[in-house]
Amino acid sequence: MKAVILDAYTTNPGDLSWDWMREFADDLTVYDHTAPQDVDARTKGCDIVITNKTRLMAPQLDALTNTRYIGLLSTGFDAVDVRYARGLGIPVTNIPAYSTGGVAQLTFALALEFTNRVALHNAAVKAGEWQKNGNFCFWKSDLRELGGKTFGVVGYGRIGHAVAKIADAFGMRVLCRTAHPEKYPDAPVTFVSLDELLLQSDFVSLHCPCTPETTGLVNRDFLAKMKPTAFLINTSRGAVVDENALREALDSGTIAGCGLDVLSTEPPKDDNPVAFHEKAIVTPHVAWAAFETRERLMGICRDNLRAFFAGKPINVVN
């Protein structure tokens, strides 16, 4: 068996091992990155093709004359034309539910940065400002508690559940917007309309998938309904937010700030409307990147392969 991993670097920059792949293929080649023009040459003759963001569309799939299996190192599967692969008889698997804890954790890392300003005050101490101030404590910005505030969760899937649970533990009132609240009769949240959530929430956190219906969900109208003291947090997908509308809202004071782990283009271009804004806290798509999270991802990838070769495939998206 021959296998290739086309873009291994972000999943495993060197702190984990791919040796377990040899359980399925004695001929294994691992590439950190693969340019589009190199895909055909690198996948030639491979029984197993593993990819994350390297795209496998119809032309690349047509060249996979030996391939029996395509494995994604991600939950999303837009990097592969899964319908076309199905027509070729090639199953495609993804990695579901591996990053729930990591994404929920980063959501509150962003929220806490707005209430406690840890990075700001650490920089002040390092710059000698504490000594110059002379008092046993000092602060450079307004500090707030999360307790008693209202946390709005847009989307109540696995990650939305986890985020709501943490918000509740902080003593926050949790509002949630989901298309099917009837599925959760015992949920410890209050289900409301999107408009009501925006009007009442001190934090609005996005945990919805990127679909034609949610693309550009956060637009001028959405932002205008938020409190001027509220913060937007996005750890879902960049395309859910109209970044030009968000820039206008930050500039005008329509909202107080935003915490973003995802952008419309990654990495951002120099003219990105929000990536470098002083009211935006931006992290480079790292909610999924904790060591334990990536270790779990690779474990699910291994389970997917084992199930496929046992004749009982799991997590097949096509």
Image (cartoon, rainbow, N blue to C red):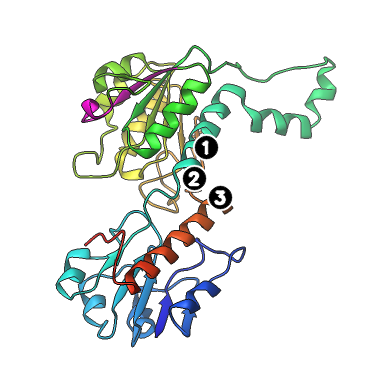
Q: Nearer the viewer, residue 9 or 37?
A: 9
Q: Nearer the viewer, residue 51 or 251?
A: 51
Type of amino acid under label 2: Ala
Query: Which residue lies under the disc numbered 2?
Result: 287
Q: Residue at x 32, y 82 (%)?
A: 40
Instruction: Tell me if residue 182 is in the magenta stretch.
Output: yes
Give SS at disc 2. loop
Image quadrant containing the N terminus: bottom left
Residue 135 rendering spot, x and y as whole percentages: 82, 14
Q: CA distance from mark 1 to mark 3?
A: 10 Å
> Which residues make up the magenta segment?
173-184
Type of amino acid under label 3: Ala
Image quadrant containing the C terminus: bottom left
Residue at the top extreme?
Answer: 148
Q: CA distance from mark 2 to mark 1?
A: 8 Å
**Which sits earlier in the primary sequence, circle 2 or circle 1?**
1
Residue 110 rendering spot, x and y as whole percentages: 52, 33
Q: Are marks 1 and 3 in contact (CB under 8 Å)?
A: yes
